[in-house]
Amino acid sequence: MSDEVEKMSVVIETRNLKKKYQMGTLDVSALGGVNLRVEAGEFMSIMGPSGSGKTTLLNLIGALDKPTEGNVLIRGTDISRLNDDELAELRNREIGFVFQFFNLMARMSALQNVEMPMAFAGVSKDERERRAMKLLDEVGLGGRVNHRPTELSGGEQQRVAIARSLANDPSVALCDEPTGNVDSETGKEIIETLRRLNREQQRTFVIVTHDPLVAGSVDRIAHMQDGLIVREETIG
């Protein structure tokens, strides 16, 4: 495979990724040398017990934190070589985020929440509205675009967050416990929405979760323990 083709097919790559935190006089290792590759169009999860390093890994591959050692490559770009402005631009352009607690702006409508990342990217108002309407329709909220988060159920808020994560057509959407703040039936609907977007639009999703329902829906699971990926499992 040529370098250019590989760059297009590998969305995320980590190389010997390590992260330590200073706690008083102690160095605490959160990641001990993680190697992971995520291909374009994958629907995969990272699973493990609390404290295994899942969220730390997600923050590093999402360019929200910097490793102590090792490298994170997004579409072949080593993000350790980027300054803060370049990192912010890369996050907005290449990475979508879906959080457990939705992180929607309470004073904004669903439509405005989805438009927000596009505003930071300099997309025109008319184009922002067109794309946001389309995304909300794709997640089943075409009739709720003018509702604020307090007027939406937990599942509806999470679907707004999913639409927002895709606003700038990112290379990958990173989902941190996306079913963790809803009931099991709503969680099932959220996973079905993510899976449908993956299949119909070849969207790439990496899902950090404890939820066994997610494990039965993905193509691949990276199992973490004590700051390492101890096993990778292909489903189906």
Image (cartoon, rainbow, N blue to C red):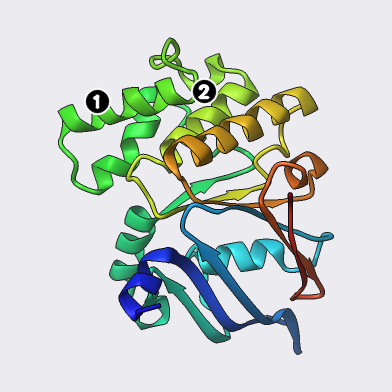
Whole-percent x, y for residue 66 in the image? 51, 76
Residue drawn at 75 percent across, 82 percent down:
28
Name the residue that disc number 1 marks.
130
Q: Is residue 235 above or below residue 200?
A: below
Tell me how far mark 2 sits from mark 1, CA to CA.
20 Å
- Please state if 194 lies on the left or on the right of 191 as rendered: left
Q: Nearer the viewer, residue 234 or 164?
A: 234
Q: Which kind of residue does numbered mark 1 sit on?
A: Arg
Query: Which numbered tag is attached to residue 149?
Result: 2
- Please state if 53 lies on the left or on the right of 206 as rendered: right
Q: Quadrant of the N terminus?
A: bottom left
Q: Nearer the viewer, residue 202 or 194?
A: 202
Residue drawn at 57 percent across, 22 percent down:
156
Query: Which numbered tag is attached to residue 1?
Result: none
Residue drawn at 52 percent across, 67 percent down:
61
Dot 1: within a 10 Å radius of its alpha carbon, few (fewer than 14), some, or many (20 or more) residues? few
Q: Nearer the viewer, mark 2 or mark 1?
A: 1
- Please state if 158 lies on the left or on the right of 124 as rendered: right
Q: Which kind of residue does numbered mark 2 sit on?
A: Pro
Whole-percent x, y for residue 72 in the image? 49, 76
Whole-percent x, y for residue 108 in the image? 39, 26
Disc 2, SS: helix
Specify the quadrant of the image occupied by residue 2.
Answer: bottom left
Residue drawn at 49 percent across, 19 percent down:
140
Q: Is residue 100 above or below residue 140?
A: below
- Any part of residue 108 in sight: no
Q: Nearer the viewer, residue 145 or 192?
A: 192
Q: Closer to the N terminus: mark 2 or mark 1?
A: 1
Whole-percent x, y for residue 162 in the image? 50, 36
Q: Is residue 143 above or below residue 59?
A: above
Q: Is residue 178 above or below residue 137?
A: below
